[in-house]
Amino acid sequence: MLTLLFSRTGAMVAGIVIATLIAVWAVTAAYQAGRNAERTAALTTSVEILRERSAIDDQTRSMDSGSLCRALGGVWVSDERTCQ
């Protein structure tokens, strides 16, 4: 067994094993980097959406029914207190 390790065939087998291990490590590292980048992008998008939602909520809270109706494209009928 020891002679196989020091022979030319043994060196080639060891080289193939080492190259395979390096390739597996590189693929795993690239996968992890891609996954982390995607998580960061998703988190950034979520934060932007929440900020926009908060701004919209602040605007709509301060509106009365007529203003809200007009903002949504309707016509406020004040006598009936309805939006058409």
Image: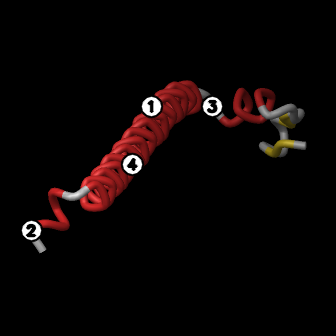
Indicate which disc residue 61 carries: none
Q: Earlier in the sequence, mark 1 or mark 4?
A: 4
Q: Quadrant of residue 16?
A: bottom left
Tell me if mark 4 has few (under 14), some (14-19) or many (20+) residues whose alpha carbon lies within 10 angstroms of its own.
Answer: few
Q: Is residue 62 visible to the viewer in this orientation of the structure?
A: no
Q: Nearer the viewer, residue 49 or 23?
A: 23
Residue at x-position 47% and y-position 41%: 38
- Residue 51 image offset from top left, x and y in percent: 47, 28
Q: Which residue is mark 4?
A: 23
Q: Are marks 2 and 1 in contact (CB under 8 Å)?
A: no
Q: Earlier in the sequence, mark 4 or mark 2?
A: 2
Q: Amino acid at mark 1?
A: Thr
Q: Amino acid at mark 2?
A: Leu
Q: Nearer the viewer, residue 53 or 68?
A: 53
Q: Quadrant of residue 66?
A: top right
Q: Which residue is mark 2?
A: 2
Q: Which residue is mark 1?
A: 44
Q: Earlier in the sequence, mark 3 or mark 4?
A: 4
Q: Amino acid at mark 3?
A: Asp
